[in-house]
Image (cartoon, rainbow, N blue to C red):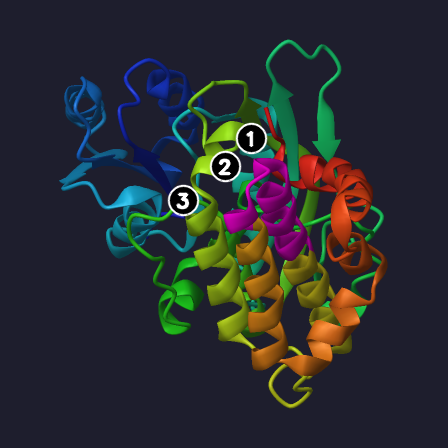
């Protein structure tokens, strides 16, 4: 069995996917690289087939009709044979030295008697034109180089979130929890990270800057204007996250620290949705923001009041034009989370 399966969702990625694949090939026979061509209309399919032909024991090329980023991740998971599963977007890449350290750690864990459900490492915001790169680190929150549980986690501060870039999940856990991302929907990477969390018992953190998250293309999903145009998809993801778990239910999620973290995660997604609606400047989208908070109140009133009357929630729900200006102060936090370009 391979140690690690890496899915690369690709849609019209011919101009940058080679950099991604090349950064992953040094994993050698310990990894499988699953390039998922999501109905591309450029040369992506041919590039994927070329890599599969050159590296038959390492690279798989899978072609499908366009289903969106989420369905490409689903396809990658269906085809994965590795012990662990990682998603690397086609315009991103990984650091070689950190990659080797991660594979070594996974190999050691695979040979031990302890099952690790989630493997976490740092990631770097590779923002175009920015010389000083921001790094998302977790050394202040997680024990290093050891297996730990949610009860061992220290304080995760605002802006310190486990994102798709930082997480590697045990493949079997993703299948057993029934993870299925929605088709034709952007921003599902939040579901990918969020939905499996209550199933995670044991974690492991390696303090290396592994994943390089590129920000700078005008057509990128995290471009602010693109996000405004796709507000309905952001809201769909947000509502699904509300639906998945009633976070006020202690029996459903016994760990207090995990519950607290998941509330913080839901809060920042609520903030992102609200900020995008506010910055669109339309009455229609401001009404959608109002309906989103109303939806949370209906599904989980206790969490609604906790979030609404928290610092971020209050800034999202202040009335009038002046209130909306204050709300945009929270934009900086959302910017740190999403990495707007």
Say which mark, if any, is on residue 186: 3
Residue at 38 percent across and 19 percent down: it is: 22
The magenta-colored residue range is 268-285
SS of the residue at dot 2? helix
Q: CA distance from mark 2 to mark 3?
A: 9 Å
The reply, left or right, for residue 193 in relation to residue 47 is right
Q: CA distance from mark 1 to mark 2?
A: 5 Å
Which mark is first along the chain, 3 or 1?
Answer: 3
The quadrant in which residue 48 appears is top left
Question: Which residue occupies the extreme bottom position in the image?
Answer: 251
SS of the residue at dot 1? helix
Residues at badges 1 and 2 in contact (C-beta under 8 Å)?
yes
* Looking at the image, residue 289 lies above or below residue 206: below
Q: Is residue 275 magenta?
A: yes
Residue for badge 1 = 224
Q: Does residue 195 show up?
A: no
Quadrant in which the C terminus appears: top right
Q: Position of residue 257 (x, y in %)?
A: 77, 71
Mark 2, residues whose alpha carbon is within 10 Å: few (<14), some, or many (≥20)? many
Residue at 52 percent across and 33 percent down: it is: 222
Residues at badges 1 and 3 in contact (C-beta under 8 Å)?
no
Which mark is first along the chain, 3 or 2?
Answer: 3
Residue at 40 percent across and 55 percent down: it is: 83
188 or 281: nearer the eye? Answer: 281
Residue for badge 2 = 227
Q: CA distance from mark 1 to mark 3?
A: 13 Å
The reply, left or right, for residue 111 in relation to residue 151 is left
């Amino acid at each position: 069995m391979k140690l690690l399966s890496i899915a690369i969702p690709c849609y019209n990625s011919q101009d940058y996917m080679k950099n991604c694949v090349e950064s992953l090939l040094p994993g050698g026979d310990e990894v499988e690289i699953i390039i998922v061509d999501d109905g591309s209309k450029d040369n992506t399919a041919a590039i994927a087939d070329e890599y599969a032909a050159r590296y038959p024991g390492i690279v798989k090329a899978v072609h499908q009709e366009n289903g969106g980023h989420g369905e490409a991740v689903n396809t990658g998971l269906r085809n994965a044979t590795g012990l662990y599963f990682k998603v690397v977007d086609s315009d991103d890449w990984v650091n070689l030295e950190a990659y080797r350290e991660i594979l070594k750690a996974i190999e050691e864990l695979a040979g031990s008697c302890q099952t690790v459900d989630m493997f976490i490492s740092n990631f770097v915001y590779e923002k175009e034109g920015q010389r000083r790169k921001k790094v998302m680190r977790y050394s202040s929150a997680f024990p290093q180089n050891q297996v730990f549980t949610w009860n061992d986690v220290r304080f995760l501060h605002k802006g310190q979130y486990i994102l798709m870039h930082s997480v590697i999940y045990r493949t079997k856990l993703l299948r057993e929890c029934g993870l299925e991302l929605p088709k034709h929907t952007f921003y599902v990477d939040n579901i990918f990270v969020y939905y499996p969390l209550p199933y995670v018992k044991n974690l492991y953190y390696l303090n290396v800057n592994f994943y390089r998250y590129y920000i700078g293309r005008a057509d990128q999903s995290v471009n602010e204007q693109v996000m405004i145009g796709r507000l309905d998809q952001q809201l769909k993801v947000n509502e699904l996250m509300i639906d998945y778990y009633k976070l006020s239910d202690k029996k459903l999620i016994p760990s207090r620290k995990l519950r607290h973290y998941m509330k913080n995660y839901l809060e920042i997604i609520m903030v992102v949705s609200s900020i995008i609606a506010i910055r669109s400047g339309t009455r229609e989208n401001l009404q959608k923001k109002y309906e989103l908070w109303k939806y949370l109140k209906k599904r989980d009133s206790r969490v609604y009041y906790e979030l609404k009357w928290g610092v971020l929630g209050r800034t999202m729900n202040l009335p009038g034009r002046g209130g909306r200006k204050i709300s945009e102060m929270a934009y900086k936090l959302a910017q740190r989370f999403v990495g707007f370009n």
